[in-house]
């Protein structure tokens, strides 16, 4: 089964996968906006680190779901 086929199957069959993918996109967009700023306040720096960590956790879980879905 090809990678794209697995992604499409998970998107249609797995609610957790869809939610993780959507959250990952939202975090990516928010981080892009933060990165456009010339300076970040201390609070923004903390929030940025938190979002980066959360995005990585989502990416790891997405990869795990893909591995679990693959046959054999």
Image: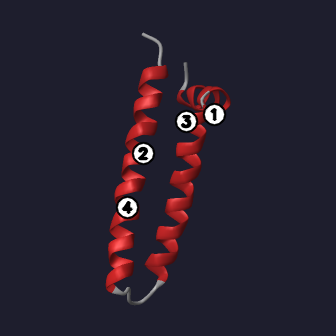
Which residue is depicted at the point 32% across and 73% down?
Answer: 46
Which residue is depicted at the point 55% across and 65% down?
Answer: 29
Q: Earlier in the sequence, mark 4 or mark 1?
A: 1
Which corner quadrant holds the N terminus?
top right
| Label ID, residue 52 | 4
Which residue is depicted at the point 34% across and 77% down?
Answer: 45
Please say if the residues under marks 2 and 1 sit with CB atoms less than 8 Å apart: no
| 10 Å crowding of disc 4: few (<14), some (14-19), many (20+) | some
Q: Position of residue 65 (x, y in %)?
A: 46, 29
Q: Earlier in the sequence, mark 3 or mark 2?
A: 3
Q: Which residue is mark 1?
A: 11
Q: Which residue is mark 3?
A: 16
Q: Position of residue 35 (x, y in %)?
A: 44, 77
SS at mark 3 in the image = helix
Distance in Å between CA atoms under marks 4 and 1: 23 Å
| 10 Å crowding of disc 1: few (<14), some (14-19), many (20+) | some
Give the color scheme: rainbow, by chain, secondary structure or one colour.
secondary structure
Mark 3 or mark 1, whichever is nearer to me: 3
Q: Farthest residue in the top direction?
A: 72
């Amino acid at each position: 089964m090809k990678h794209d086929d697995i992604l499409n199957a998970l998107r249609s069959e797995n609610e957790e996968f869809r939610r993780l993918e959507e959250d990952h996109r939202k975090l990516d967009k928010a981080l892009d906006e933060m990165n456009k700023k010339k300076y970040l306040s201390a609070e923004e720096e903390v929030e940025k680190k938190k979002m980066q960590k959360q995005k990585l956790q989502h990416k790891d879980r997405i990869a795990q779901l893909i591995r679990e879905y693959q046959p054999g």
